[in-house]
Amino acid sequence: MTELKNDLFLRACLRQPVERTPVWMMRQAGRYLPQYRATRQRAGGFLDLCKTPELACEVTVQPVELVGVDAAILFSDILVVPEAMGMELTFGAGEGPRFPQPVRSRADVERLPVPDPEEKLGYVMEAVRLIRRELAGRVPLIGFSGSPWTLATYMVEGGGSKNYAKVKGMMFNEPETMHLLLGKLADAVAAYLNAQIANGVQAVQIFDTWGGILTTRDYREFSLAYMRRIIEQLTREHEGRRVPVILYTKGGMGWLEAIADAGPDVVGLDWTIDIDVARARIGDRVALQGNMDPTMLYAKPERIRAEVKDILVRFGRGSGHVFNLGHGITPDVPVEHAKAFVQAVKEESPAWH
Amino acid sequence: MTELKNDLFLRACLRQPVERTPVWMMRQAGRYLPQYRATRQRAGGFLDLCKTPELACEVTVQPVELVGVDAAILFSDILVVPEAMGMELTFGAGEGPRFPQPVRSRADVERLPVPDPEEKLGYVMEAVRLIRRELAGRVPLIGFSGSPWTLATYMVEGGGSKNYAKVKGMMFNEPETMHLLLGKLADAVAAYLNAQIANGVQAVQIFDTWGGILTTRDYREFSLAYMRRIIEQLTREHEGRRVPVILYTKGGMGWLEAIADAGPDVVGLDWTIDIDVARARIGDRVALQGNMDPTMLYAKPERIRAEVKDILVRFGRGSGHVFNLGHGITPDVPVEHAKAFVQAVKEESPAWH
């Protein structure tokens, strides 16, 4: 194994001492980078980019080299898991993802297999191996998956949704069918993340993008319970190191204690909560990741720096903070602003350690 | 004055004893009703419907007669206020609202007047008077406005938005310009709501649809402060009765204490918080409105009834609860489900009073 030169991210995830706060950005391999857009152009479609390991590797490494983040995150899409379960997936130009044959009945759910990730998602595993080689120990590599509830949302709606009529309808009217679907997804995701770990990712994040549209009761029953089921199945140590698990539910700031109880090493925060409040609530049990408003990257660099300082002051002294945005970086952010953000964290955070 | 035959809603807003829990639905005068669609067809465009008092009256009264709700809410659109400030407003077929000349600079903001509502929004006032006559004391009439922050969002973005780049950019880079805009909007909204009250609305709701996209600090500074400024200017008594003020911030459940402190009689809840938790936090100071997940209306009537019972149990005994959805009813809900919801509240709630 190549020695890891910058392990700030992994240490912060485990609340071990660090010299400064590590920083990365959700969706950092993305359209705000001209180099990403160029690689994507060469790939053809978005799914082609995901499925071509050399190109997925290229865009994964770009923000490490261009923006200076302290961790790389595997470039892929959460919906490759349902596709590996046999669902046709398309990305129309300018549109979001579509499943032309959505899951609507008990029979539809029963037909879905729990796929072998090495077989059905081999292109992801190849990308992971390539990226590790390419990174050569510069920074750790994060793997990821969507949460079962979030994946189910797309699979039942057939794509993005405004009202979630169909997935909520299934949840309310056929809870057993929904539980069957979520159970399969949890097992598929656990196998998928374990394969990512076996192939070389050094931490994993579960993205629960749509957990926040649920009531407290439904969140616990239909989203959190299945993320816990995943975490219980995960390989927690590999290559002689702990593999941290990050759990991020957008809109879930009311449920932080329950999220921390599900067993992750790190809880991801969106920007609607003050990080000092979050630390007071769960900081004795888990590390925190976040949580600058991603739209702050539209502000001038000096305003961005002031915000970084404010969040560092709020978190206070000590380890257990992975600096990030509260959600993904948006496509029209100037690259210079993303760099200014990362630079500000690097320059302002040593005083707190 | 016609005597008010059903004042359950007004009494519950003031936490006075009631025989049963009153119920209405946000966006109850809406597309899920075939009769609404027929009236809208006759009107022509959506704005024509808002601006024709007879037709606005017709759709306002429809859910009282067809669904049996305990309050009517004035049919209008929050964006008539920016239009009254001189901004051109269009609703394309199937699209959302557009302001072709959005507010982007200090000069744009300085040009905006605070309109006289009787002069510039006379069609709303005429609708209010017509509706009161048409209701003839059957149920009270609620007036409303968008919050300054929510209105500013549309005015700066030029319509709906995914990333809020422009309005957040103005907030971060030119906070003084944003404050000038929000101050004008607060005064315009206060005058508008006071005119609604003078013409006959018996309660008012401020809809802060987009407050929940802000950080805690920005919510207080750029949204809540201006809702407080409105509340401080409002006529709180008319026709010998208290005029309750309802404050609703979607996604603001982390800030309930601060919202209650801003001075409303009622705090509107979205569905992401349990109403017992909300009551424990602020129920000694304000009434609560909400908070069934609006997508529950896609479920079967017996499931809807179970959910109504669950929320009644959670709220517990006594007054101070206005039953509602946690957000607006969606266009594709079956009318029978909306009726089943209202009926369930009427039948299940007397046991709690």
Image (spheres, coloured by chain):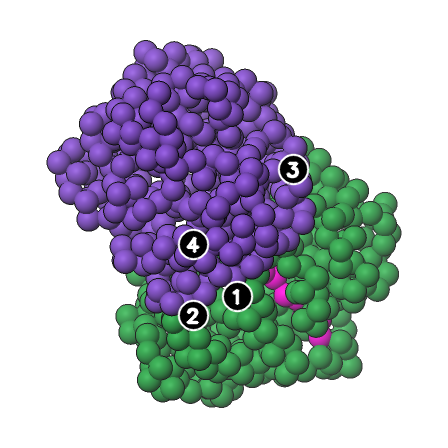
Chain colours: A purple, B green
What residue lies at 53% left-to-right and 79% top-to-bottom? B186
Indicate the amino acid at tag 3. Arg
User: Closer to the observer: label 2 or label 4?
Assistant: 4
- Asked whether the residues under marks 2 and 1 belong to the same chain, the reply is yes
Residue topped by disc 1: B218
Mark 2 is surrounded, within 10 Å at the Cα level, by few (under 14), some (14 to 19) or many (20 or more) other residues, namely some
Dot 2: element? helix
- Identify the residue position indicated by label 2 in the image: B171
**The disc labelled 1 sits on which kind of residue?**
Asp
Q: Is residue A162 above or below residue A45?
A: below
Callout 2 amino acid: Met
Q: Which residues are magenta?
A: B243-249
The quadrant holding residue A124 is top left
Along the line of sight, which residue is nearer the eye, A188 or B150? Answer: A188
Residue placed under numbered mark 3 in the picture: A285
The answer to whether mark 3 and mark 2 are in CB contact below 8 A is no
Which chain letter matches label 3?
Answer: A
**Disc 2 chain ID:** B
Q: Is residue B247 located in the magenta-colored stretch of the structure?
A: yes
Give the image location of residue B257, x and y in percent. 70, 62
Residue found at the far left of this picture: A42
